[in-house]
Structures are given as C-alpha cells and as structure tokens.
C-alpha cells in the first residue's frame, strides 16, 4: 500500500509533456554522472594530492628543524624563503599549551598526521586563522619554531577548475541536446495540435508532415484519416439534404391541400401531423449538417441567451435567467451552432416543465451554462442513452410531446466540437439539469 502511494506521488511530480520528459531523460544521467565523478574521482584525487603535498611540507619542516642548530637560524630563514616561500621564526623560552586544539579541517588533519609520522616533538597546526597561510609551531628545547607556509604548498587549490570545466561542458552538452530535442518534438506537437483542432471542428492551415520517419508516417496517416472523415461527413450531408429536398415538395403539397379543405377535426389533426413531419425533417437535417464550416467568432453568451429566451413565445412558462457577473461573458465559438445548442436544451426544458431556470457563470477559465426544469426528469441510468440520436425515453417522459429525439444529440455534438462537456444531473426543481462546461 505504501509503495503504491509513493509511486503515485512520484508520478504526480514527474512532468506530463513529451518535451519535458525527454529533457529529463537527458539531464538526469548527466547530473548523476557529475555526482559520481565528483564523489569518486575528484574527492579521492583531492585527498591524495593534499596528502602528498602535506607529506612533502612535513618533511621540509622536519629537515629545517634538524639542521637549524648547525646552520643557524638566519641561514634556515634564507633557504626557506628562497626555495620554499616559507617564513621561519624562532620564539625563545616559549612552550606550547598543554591542551592543543584538535584539527578542524582537512588541511590541519592531513598535515598533523604527516607530521606525527616523522616527528616526536609537540606541534600545532593552524589552517583556519588565515585564508591563504598555514601556521605550524614546533616545540623544541629552549623555544618554539614557527613556520608560516602558503596554503597552496599544503592543499590542492586548483580542484575547482575541474569542477568549472565539468559544469561548462555539461551545460554545453545539455544546450545542444535541448536544441536538437526541440526540433524533434516540434513535429509531434504540431500533429497533436492539428488533431485537437480537427476534433474541435477547426482545420489547421499549412499542416505538413515533418520530422523523423515515424512522425511523418503518423502525420500522413492522420491527413488521410481527416480526408476520409471530411468526405464521409460531406456525403452524409448531401444525401440527407437530397432526401430533405425530395420530401419537402410532397409535404408542402399535402399541407396546401389540407389547408384548402374544410376546418374539421380530421383535417386539423392531419395538418398537425404534416407540420410535425416538417419539423422532424428539419431536425434530421440539422443533425447531419456540417457545422464545422462556420467560423468561430468572439460571442457574448449573456446577450445570446437573453435573445433566445426573449424569442421563445411559450405560454404559461416561467423562464428565470441568473447571471452572477454583470459584465459580458465572451467565448470564441460558432455562434449559429452555439445558439442552436442552447435553444434545443431550452425547448427541451420548456416541453417537460413549467418552471425553467437558466444560469450563466464564469469561474477563472471555465464557462458554465446550466438549464434546469421541474419536469419528470431522466433516470440516472438513462443519461448515456438520452444523448444518443433518435432515442426518446418515453418511459420517463411525456409520450404525447412531439419530437425526433435529436435535441440532446445535437447539443452534445455542438458542445464536443467546442471542446466542452455536456453533463446531466438531477435538478433542485425536481426535473433535469443540463450543464455545459467550456474552457475559455
């Protein structure tokens, strides 16, 4: 259980995009390699060089201390200054303190160990008081010898150069990898964007296969699939348009003949049936119409919904429109299709309920349109079935209400073509609540 939770948290931290993941695949091994080199090679090399330098300095100090009584202090000072760039000072009648401080850094620790190997006298190493100098005091009979030695003689000071060059070379390598990776990822991003735009009913202009062979093949397959879908939609539209045109003529002729007959009950019922057939025919044509040909424009949804409500001449219906923000709410959409979508939902609500509430709200980047009624509603298990074309849920709705069963289907298609979601739920009024959610 703990392993699954840790794995899930780790996956949430990881980047989701292909470009960022590809960069991570390149950068992580470089960083790990640098860490290994720094820890294994540089650290050991640094300690080895420092130990060798400290050993040489310890030998020099021991030599000067041993020859000082025979050569004299002045000669020792001259030789140390000339050949080793070290200052020697003799402090007579002095002794080191009993509690000599312990080494606190690498230089003091290493040099103390090397001095202990070749000397039995008391000594003290100070490598923290001065930044560039190391002080070594040796206790002898009669006084103390004090050596001031450059830190570079004891400590490997050029190790940072290796780090600098390693970092520079790594940055150069990563920069080149980023440039080449970007060129390889760009065709995939274009293909993804083209597919997304086509799914929203838009067509990406000047899209051509590019990039690696596999990406080119995928792009070519996508273009062929797009052509087949467009051809299928065009054939479906033309077929239903032809059927609609062929059926409208006899229906219009029947309507004229019925209107010329006497106004008895039978003729009125027949005329009502003909009118319903015309409406159903128009609904079929709307369902098959290629709405993607309409261009998206910036539309004020608040004004559009007000116009739809005002245009609905429905008696004994209460339509309440709630907007939390007084400012216009703009959304880039195909205005005719969006108007048809909202009109279908509003007509559907008016057909089954007397109290209808319409709400429009924008939260951050999400636009929410909700339409609810106080009708009989739809069972939760039938939500998926309700949005299918030509399906009427007569078991839960009024059977005497005319319709083709395409209202929700058309609204669902238009919502999906705009990148939104159509969500059905139980209304607070007791009927059906339909929400349209769009990313602005």
Image: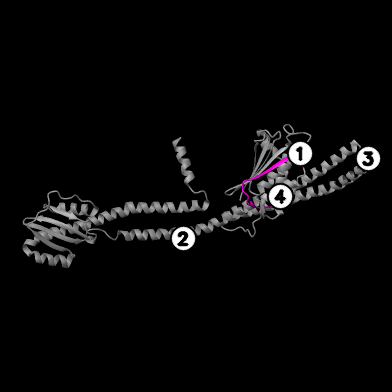
- The answer to whether 259 appears left or right of 316 in the picture is right
Which one is closest to the eye, mark 1 or mark 4?
1
Which residue occupies the foreground of this view, 432 or 56?
Answer: 432
> Tag on residue 262?
3
Which residue occupies the foreground of this view, 282 or 86?
Answer: 282
Q: Which residue is mark 4?
A: 337
Q: Which structural element holds mark 2?
A: helix
The tag earlier along the polypeptide, 3 or 4, is: 3
Q: Residue at coordinates 9% horizontally, 62% vertically from top-left?
A: 68
Would you say residue 242 sits in the magenta stretch?
A: no
Q: Residue at coordinates 19% horizontally, 49% vertically from top-left?
A: 102
Which one is closest to the eye, mark 3 or mark 4?
3
Q: Which residue is mark 2?
A: 176
Q: Which structural element holds mark 3?
A: loop
Q: Is residue 221 visible?
A: no
The tag earlier along the polypeptide, 1 or 3, is: 3
Separation (CA) of disc 2 from disc 3: 87 Å
Q: Which structural element holds mark 4?
A: helix
Is the residue marked by circle 4 packed among few (<14), some (14-19), or many (20+) residues within 10 Å? many
Is the residue marked by circle 3 packed among few (<14), some (14-19), or many (20+) residues within 10 Å? few
Q: Which residue is mark 1?
A: 316
Is the residue marked by circle 2 packed among few (<14), some (14-19), or many (20+) residues within 10 Å? few
Q: Which structural element holds mark 1?
A: loop
């Amino acid at each position: 259980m703990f392993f699954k939770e840790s794995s899930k948290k780790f996956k949430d931290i990881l980047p989701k995009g292909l470009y960022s993941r590809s960069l991570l695949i390149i950068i992580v091994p470089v960083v790990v390699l640098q860490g290994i080199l720094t820890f294994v090679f540089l650290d050991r090399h640094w300690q080895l060089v420092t130990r060798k330098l400290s050993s040489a300095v310890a030998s020099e100090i021991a030599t000067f201390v041993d020859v000082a009584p025979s050569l004299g202090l002045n000669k020792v000072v001259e030789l140390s200054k000339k050949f080793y760039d070290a200052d020697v000072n003799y402090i007579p009648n002095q002794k080191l303190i009993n509690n000599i401080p312990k080494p606190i850094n690498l230089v003091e620790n290493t040099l103390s160990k090397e001095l202990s190997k070749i000397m039995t006298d008391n000594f003290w190493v100070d490598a923290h008081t001065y930044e560039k100098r190391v002080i070594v005091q040796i206790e002898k009979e009669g006084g103390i010898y004090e050596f001031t030695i450059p830190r570079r003689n004891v400590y490997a000071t050029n190790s940072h150069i290796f780090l600098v060059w390693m970092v520079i070379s790594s940055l150069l390598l990563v920069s080149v990898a980023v440039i080449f990776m970007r060129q390889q990822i760009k065709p995939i991003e274009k293909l993804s964007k083209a597919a997304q735009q086509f799914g929203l009913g838009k067509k990406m202009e000047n899209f051509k296969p590019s990039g690696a062979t596999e990406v080119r093949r995928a792009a070519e397959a996508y273009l062929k699939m797009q052509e087949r879908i467009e051809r299928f939609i065009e054939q479906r539209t033309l077929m239903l348009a032809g059927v609609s045109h062929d059926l409208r003529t006899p229906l219009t002729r029947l309507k004229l003949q019925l209107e010329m007959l006497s106004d008895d009950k039978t003729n009125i019922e027949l005329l009502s049936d003909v009118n319903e057939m015309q409406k159903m025919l128009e609904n079929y044509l709307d369902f098959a119409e290629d709405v993607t040909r309409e261009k998206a424009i910036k539309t004020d949804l608040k004004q559009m919904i007000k116009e739809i409500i005002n245009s609905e001449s429905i008696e004994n219906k209460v339509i309440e429109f709630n907007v939390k923000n007084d400012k216009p709410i703009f959304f880039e959409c195909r205005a005719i299709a969006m108007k048809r979508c909202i009109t279908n939902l509003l007509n559907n609500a008016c057909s089954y309920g007397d109290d209808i509430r319409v709400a429009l709200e924008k939260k951050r980047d999400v636009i929410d349109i909700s339409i609810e009624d106080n009708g009989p509603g739809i069972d939760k298990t039938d939500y998926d079935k309700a949005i299918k074309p030509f399906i009427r849920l007569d078991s839960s709705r009024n059977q005497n209400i005319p319709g083709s069963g395409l209202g929700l289907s058309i609204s669902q298609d238009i919502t999906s073509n705009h990148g939104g979601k159509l969500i059905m739920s139980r209304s607070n009024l007791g009927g059906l609540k339909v929400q349209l959610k769009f990313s602005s």
